Amino acid sequence: MTNKILKTRNVRLYYGEKEALHGINLSYEPTGINALIGPSGSGKSTYLRTLNRMHDLTDYVTVNGTFTFKGQDIYAPNMDVVELRKEIGMVFQQPNPFPFSIYDNVAFGIRISGEKDKAILDERVETSLKQAAIWDEVKDSLHKSALSLSGGQQQRVSIARALATQPQVLLLDEPTAALDPVSSHKVEDTLMSLRDQYAMIIVTHSMSQASRISDQTAFFMDGHLVEVNATKKIFMNPDKQETQDYISGRFG
Amino acid sequence: MDEIRESLLKESKAARRDKFGRAISFSALLLIVVVVVSIFYFVASKGLATFFVNKVNIWDFLTGTKWAPGQVDAHGKAFVGAAPMITGSFLVTFLSALIATPFAIGTAVFMTEISPKRGAKILGPVTELLVGIPSVVYGFIGVSVLVPFMRATFGGSGFGILSGSMVLFVMILPTVTSMTVDTLKAVPRHYRESALALGATRWQMIYKVILRGATPGILTAVVFGMARAFGEALAVQMVVGNAALMPQNLTSPAATLTSVLTQGIGNTVMGSLENNALWSLALILLLMSLVFNTVIRAIAKKGAM
């Protein structure tokens, strides 16, 4: 238990008065892929966004619970959110590169931390694009607009952009939901190649995706964490009846 | 069978209504086109008459610095140099846009990013109110507040390019601001989220992502403001000094195309050189508004890519 990189205990989240997450306990190994599955509106994405404090942006949301990242309280008043988000990167559902060149997109996170050295920028951009398995496709057009790429390529550029700040944890909010099967597969391959270096937490609606790529799976329903276990166990022989029903497609 | 056949071949009530509606909107469109074309034709025929009927050299007209269409020089040529007014118009336009742009961007950023609630509640309605104030009111305030202030600060009469630019700055500020607000609001929310998720501070998010993404829209807003400043007549005329002289400095009395037009058009005889020369000024105004429009379209096209 002690080598967990990220631990959350009794996470409760309120939209105004209404409680939307009812005490979630989850923790993550420093490497590997963790899938969060569950029907729409079950709170998976909401939970994911508590981990890098994205809910700070909406003023009617209150988050309670204990969040520790490498022993540090994420919600401590003196926590530097800007630094936290460089350690815990995020990739969104819609491929959303900025309307800049591919290079400028990937370099964004490095530049805003004040890095100006061209050699370092070049090196980090190249490494990140290679990690995201898109370097070969874009290396000759780094200064073309990222919006000229296909959806799948844009999503891998978004992943490269998140990797460029050298995070330890990567949050992925349904990263393949807006992509066609071929592009999804490429993104999945990218995630698989990163599993030994990062802790990844991925929200997905695709059960087959969760079973293919993840090491640990957590099943959410109605703001509760129903069950969390090794992915194999969840898909072969879950403890709870609801999990069994959801996985076999009986509801949701 | 025949009944169905008949009803299929007969025009239904809905189809007739459809045709009627199309006819109405088409005739409205036609009317607008006719109006625009006639305006162009009228202004162009009158404005070009200066050059073709009164045989004024176009180059002399654009570069000449003496404007006195009623008088002739030693060679019998009339003084129709429009350069002072052209310079005056461009100076007030660019100066007012130059001052208005940072204020507009600042206000718009405050209204959309920093304090959207207060922005929507207070600043939004205030900006809209400013758009609706008649230009004569701006001009009147300019004459009674701004001109004395300029006189006291810079000496001279207080009338001049600077006073004109300041009045125009206040007049175009709400236009530029509200258009900039619309552009900033149109920047997708996911740009904001992903910038923050990458560890950007709010300020970095605003100026590295939002303003950069909104640049085409902001440029359009500024050009719109410039078009408005270029065409504004009354308020400028009240504070600019109305001396058709090449501006020596920003506080010397000057004139713009519009101010000379509004002053002179009622005092000249149709068909005379004095009158035609004014139409030539109007033609320049019209062509410039075309240029502004083209620029706006070009920016919009480039921004859409």
Image (cartoon, rainbow, N blue to C red):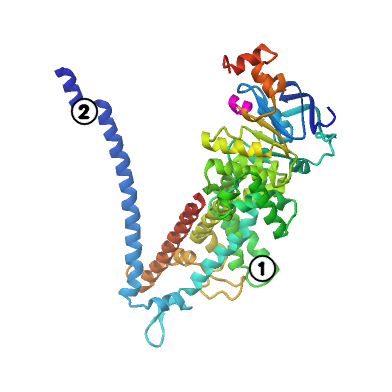
Image coordinates of residue A248 in percent, x first then y, are: 58, 16
> What amino acid is found at the position of numbered circle 2 in the picture?
Glu
Which chain's residue wears label 2? B
The residue lying toward the viewer, choosing from A235 and A176, is A235
Residue B11 numbered mark, or none: 2
Residue contact at pointers 1 and 2, CB within 8 angstroms: no
Taking the spot 41% from the left edge, 80% from the top edge, the residue there is B71
The residue lying toward the viewer, choosing from B160 and B55, is B55
Asked if the stretch drawn in magenta spans residue B277, the answer is no
| Sooner in the amino-acid sequence: mark 1 or mark 2 | 2
Q: Give the range drawn in magenta.
A: A205-211
Taking the spot 66% from the left edge, 35% from the top edge, the residue there is A172
Image coordinates of residue B182 in percent, x first then y, are: 56, 45
| SS type, badge 2 | loop
Q: Is residue B15 visible?
A: yes
Residue B191 quadrant: top right
Between the C-alphas of marks 1 and 2, the distance is 75 Å
- How packed mark 1 is, by other alpha carbons closer than 10 Å (few <14, some 14-19, many 20 or more), is some
The residue lying toward the viewer, choosing from B301 and A104, is A104
| SS type, badge 1 | helix
- The main secondary structure of the magenta stretch is helix
Tag 1 residue: B151
Residue A196 quadrant: top right
> Seen from this angle, which residue lies furthest top?
A241
Query: On the rendered structure, is B5 left or right of A7?
Result: left
